[in-house]
Amino acid sequence: MGGLYIITKRALAPPVDFEVSVASNPDDGFGSPDGWYGGSSTAYIQLGKSGLPIRICFFRFDNVLIPANSTILSAKMRVYAYSSSTVTLNLVMHVDKTSNSVTPTDYTDLDSRPLTSGTNWQITDPWTNAFAYYTSDFSVEIQELIDGVVWSSGNAMTVIVKNAIGNTTTRSLRHYPVGLPARLIVQYRPPN
């Protein structure tokens, strides 16, 4: 004998916009087998490859207020060009898979971090010095982080950008010590 069933739908939580900038001197930089350029070593961050050394860049964001079990709808970084450039770069964006990422101490530390799968970021548009530009959407990388570790709102997150095959030159970004630091821009839906 059948009964009457009432099905109710729970409304989804509305999307939330969250932004945070690199907040201190040692929390962004780059390294390669020939040297470490974290913190105040230089006035810029180099993406790509310069001669033989391949650059690995990092951007650490403290106090990332995204609740555990959220759905990441979009994620980009806003960066500022350090110099004008028209070269094409093929890069891969990752997130350090550590639940509360600490600032890398040297190239070996940076290169040995456990990473998310990776999202391609191809830069083809001309850059003008001190203008803002946006990365590819890498929301799947942040989703992979918060789904795969014991994530807590307020943890630190490090975005790591690696060189992809084919780059023979670099583009340069401004970083924290010279103003206009990278900014993480995320839209997420919190859990119900």
Image: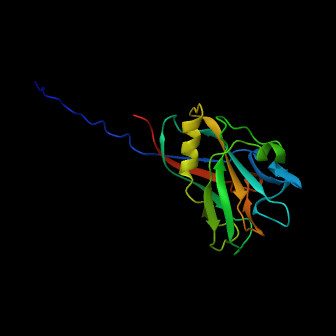
Q: Nearer the viewer, residue 125 or 130?
A: 125
Q: Residue extending furthest front?
A: 1
Q: Is residue 45 visible?
A: yes
Establish if 132 lies above or below 156. below
Q: Nearer the viewer, residue 110 or 2?
A: 2
**Residue 48 picture location, percent across and down:** 75, 63
Q: Residue at x 80, y 42 (%)?
A: 109
Q: Residue at x 65, y 40 (%)?
A: 97
Q: Quadrant of the N terminus?
A: top left
Where is residue 88, by image quadrant?
Answer: bottom right
Q: Residue extending furthest right?
A: 34
Q: Residue at x 59, y 30 (%)?
A: 150
Establish if 175 lies above or below 150. below
**Residue 172 picture location, percent across and down:** 75, 64
Q: How many marks?
A: 0
Q: Is residue 65 visible?
A: no
Q: How is the image coloured?
A: rainbow
